[in-house]
Image (cartoon, helix red, strand yellow):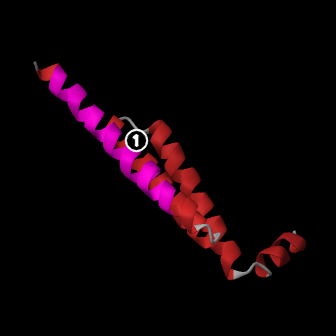
């Protein structure tokens, strides 16, 4: 038990950032799967994508971060929200 506590004390700041972002990604992913509303799932998936952008920035991969921000967070989320609103408009007719 003392070895585990000692290993946590020896973590650097960047390690804490990795664990924080990774934990938040897991939490938002589980929320996206378990959410009752589709819109909430889309927002959670967008949050996971934005957290992966932060992770890529910390890992010093700006080209991958920019691509993920544009395609993963921006375009994919916009397409899913647009499709959701089109489905809801079709149900009203």
Q: Is residue 2 left or right of residue 50?
A: right
* Residue at image point 60% right, 59% down: 23
Specify whether residue 54 is painted magenta.
no
Quadrant where the C terminus sits is: top left
Side (left or right) of 26 relative to 45: right
Horizontally, residue 93 falls left or right of residue 78, namely: left
Q: Position of residue 1 (x, y in %)?
A: 87, 68
Residue 89 appearing in the image: yes
Q: Is residue 37 left or right of residue 48?
A: left
Of residues 14 and 62, the one nearer the viewer is 62
What is the x, y in percent for residue 70? 42, 55
Quadrant of the image occupied by residue 40? top left
Residue at which label 1 appears: 41
Residue 47, compared with residue 11, is above or below; it is: above
Q: Mark 1 falls on what kind of element?
A: helix
Does the magenta-highlighted stretch encompass residue 72? yes
**Residue 37 shows in the view:** no
Residue 76 percent across, percent down from the top left = 40, 43
Compare residues 35 and 53 and report the one nearer the observer: 53
Q: Residue at point 37% right, 35% down?
A: 36
Q: What secondary structure do most residues of the magenta stretch adopt? A: helix
Residue ID at (57%, 59%): 64
Q: Is residue 54 above or below residue 44?
A: below
Q: In the picture, residue 2 is in which quadrant?
A: bottom right
Identify the residue at image location x=24%, y=26%. Answer: 87
From the top left corner, tell me how far across and down residue 63 is, in percent. Answer: 55, 63
Q: Which residues are magenta?
A: 66-90
- Neighbor class of circle 1 (other Cα within 10 Å; few <14, some 14-19, many 20+) is some
Q: Is residue 17 above or below residue 91?
A: below
User: For residue 78, which quarter of the picture?
Assistant: top left
């Amino acid at each position: 038990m003392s070895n585990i506590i000692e290993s946590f004390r020896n973590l650097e700041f960047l390690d804490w950032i990795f664990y924080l972002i990774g934990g938040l990604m897991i939490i938002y992913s589980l929320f996206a799967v378990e959410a009752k509303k589709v819109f909430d799932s889309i927002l959670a998936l967008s949050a996971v994508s934005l957290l992966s952008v932060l992770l890529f920035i910390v890992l010093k991969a700006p080209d991958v971060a920019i691509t993920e921000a544009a395609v993963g967070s921006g375009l994919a989320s916009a397409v899913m929200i647009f499709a959701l609103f089109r489905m809801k408009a079709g149900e009203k007719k």
